[in-house]
Amino acid sequence: MGGWTQHNGQAIALPLANVDTDQLIPARFMSVPRADGYGNFLLHDLRRDAQGTLRSDLPLNAHSGASVLVAGRNFGSGSSREAAVYALVDAGFHAVIAPSFGDIFASNAVNNGLLPARIEDAACEALLAQLGAGMLPVTVDLHASTIAINGTILTFALEESWRIKLINGWDDIDLTQQYTPDISRYKDNRSQTASWAWPAAAD
Amino acid sequence: MSTPLTLLDKLWAAHEIVTRQDGVSLLWVDRHLVHEGSHHAFAKLAARSAHVAAPELTFAVVDHYAPTRNRAHIADPQIARMIDTLRANAATHGLRLFDLGDPAQGIVHVIGPEQGLTLPGLLINCGDSHTSTHGAFGALAFGIGATEVAHVLATQTIWQKKPPAMRITVDGALGAGVSAKDIALNWIAKLGTDGARGHALEYTGSAIRGLSMEGRMTLCNLSIEGGARFGMIAPDETTLAYVEGRPHAPRGRDWDAALTAWSDLTTDDDAEFVRDVHFDASDISPTVTWGTSPEQALPVTAMVPDPGQLTDDKADAARAALDYMGLVAGRPLAGTQVDQVFIGSCTNGRIEDLRAAAAVLAGRQAKVPGIVSPGSALIKAQAEAEGLDKVFTDAGLDWVASGCSMCVGMNGDLVAEGKRCASSTNRNFRGRQGRGARTHLMSPAMVAAAAVAGALTDVRPLLQGRPA
Ligand code: SF4
């Protein structure tokens, strides 16, 4: 996964609160290998009517090429399925902007180079209103923590450690390897001082 | 005098390996539970030719895709492939697998405690959001995504930033027919699905102390539905009595050492919480959800809410939810006809849940079809020894094998489009139980009552004259 500092793209609105990960990707698609691509599963049941035809009244369907999604509070709540992030990333998204995110979703997002940008409730409402059913050019800057859209510049909040990870495209496993001696020391100590913490052999 | 510490502080300190300058800590993982959905993580591991760092601390279970009927012949090739992939990964890495035919098979959050793998003082991870369940033992337990699962597999550690501590105190006595499920739905309705977002939640108070381990697990399980990172309850006599003698629980000298270590796992007097919320148990009634988010819940005696009378931010969501659920504002919730019922899941598929449902169903007929899926094969055997299976089948419900089943429908146990299901599970999200399915969450006793009435109904009158 490569890192990034600035993204120039197109923003669209999904003016819904509590868009949970079951909606982002329904469970029945989760057995697919990642290599097959998850983009088509993104918000599958919300985007299609019962016959499977794409609903024309959703900005997500009306515009192709969107890469920044603006949504309501508590985006990505619910199941820990990282597939919800795969669906967004494979559909071409680089950032989701919302007043708040489900915790596990947000860390999954960062692990896949997708920015979960938090902005104030009121600013988000205004942004959703500006976007309406349309699509607008947007510039997201990770260093400056800014979103420039339609002549306005908004500041977003992000954990500092997540900013660094997104910019560098770091993989945690590589990062952790440098702490191998610390881990060994901890493990030795724990196994001596708290041997009860290891599972007893079942009879 | 040293600073008073919270349970979170103590658990955190015991697992911290290093803390980076940015405040993120590398934590030791005592137990790692994987299931069929962990295939992405195993693929990541394979891609870097890495091995599982601590196979003796990693346990695999078939649950999400587990067929609840006719296990010998899995008709759906996709489901068979998911299970076979887990089998292959467990074999490659030498992991103990609770496979379909294992007498101890069951839902990951049910069998962890049941097998004594879940203990006070541990850090437990699983690629499933309801991992918060295990916090009921005074453990640090949280769900993680696939990238993090791969990280735990490869290193037996996880990077986390310590969350702020929040406390919910519930004092007093719960009324008859009111359970841990109602405590949970009640607080989530009051505080919202993001009411505890980003927080480590500790439950305390006399009503919590009075809960069995089953009840505590239900409560901690649902913490994630209120946004909490962890749900925790300090261990006490009830915890120890549950843990002692379990297959993988410490024995002999280790047990004595564990008791000493666990006796310190309480929040010190005067420790600080960033948020402290109080509830009175006697204010809590049997509760049902009416919408498509767990926060859209009300006492079963209430009316379907009128979006026009809700605050702006809730009104649109309520309108959309009522539309999806096919409910009319202002009508009583009780009396809403249901098409089917489901009793099971890691939230409410334990023996006590089955007993509570059977107490309502005994000698009665269900007006609608339904499935009862015990949380584990051991619970299934126990229920059969107690004759509970007979109560369910005599009432007209299906008694099936254990797995996630209709909680998430991955194994094919689905609610059909537009059908209404009274369910003891944890998520009433759109499409959770199947595309277009309408889910009402409630306690197992309330589900049983809905089965008897063929509609949402207050369980309390049905319990009158019956032993508690
Ligand atoms: S029963 Fe439901 S919530 Fe629990 S682990 Fe299975 S799918 Fe997840």
Image: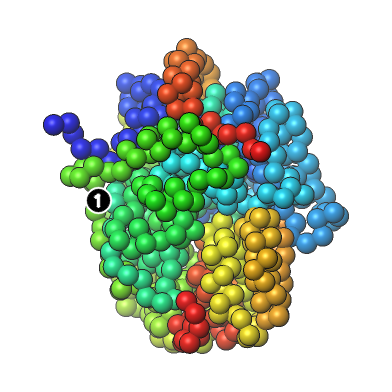
x 49%, y 58%: residue:
B214
Mark 1: secondary structure: strand
Position of residue B32 measured from the top left corner of the image (x, y, whole percent): 56, 36
> In screen coordinates, is B31 left or right of B389?
left
Give the vertical position of B433 relative to A96 (above or below).
Answer: below
x 53%, y 59%: residue:
B347
| Depth check, front residue: B386 or A53 | B386
Position of residue A124 measured from the top left corner of the image (x, y, whole percent): 34, 51
Q: Quadrant of residue B358?
A: bottom right
Which quadrant of the picture is home to ligand 1?
A: bottom right
Position of residue B308 measured from the top left corner of the image (x, y, whole percent): 35, 78
On the question of residue A70 being in view, the answer is no
List the single residue furthest toward the front. B252
Task: Tell me which chain the residue with mark 1 is part of.
Answer: B
- The tally of labels here is 1
> In screen coordinates, is A31 left or right of B453?
right
x 46%, y 51%: residue:
B241
x 68%, y 36%: residue:
B96
> In screen coordinates, is B31 left or right of A145?
right
> In screen coordinates, is A124 left or right of B239?
left
User: Label 1 sits on what residue type?
Assistant: Arg
Position of residue B173 measured from the top left corner of the image (x, y, whole percent): 32, 70
- Split into 4 quadrants, where in the image is the N terminus of chain B? top left
| Depth check, front residue: B276 or B339 | B276
Q: Which residue is mark 1?
A: B275
On the question of residue B289 being in view, the answer is yes
Give the vertical position of A47 relative to B286 (above or below).
Answer: above
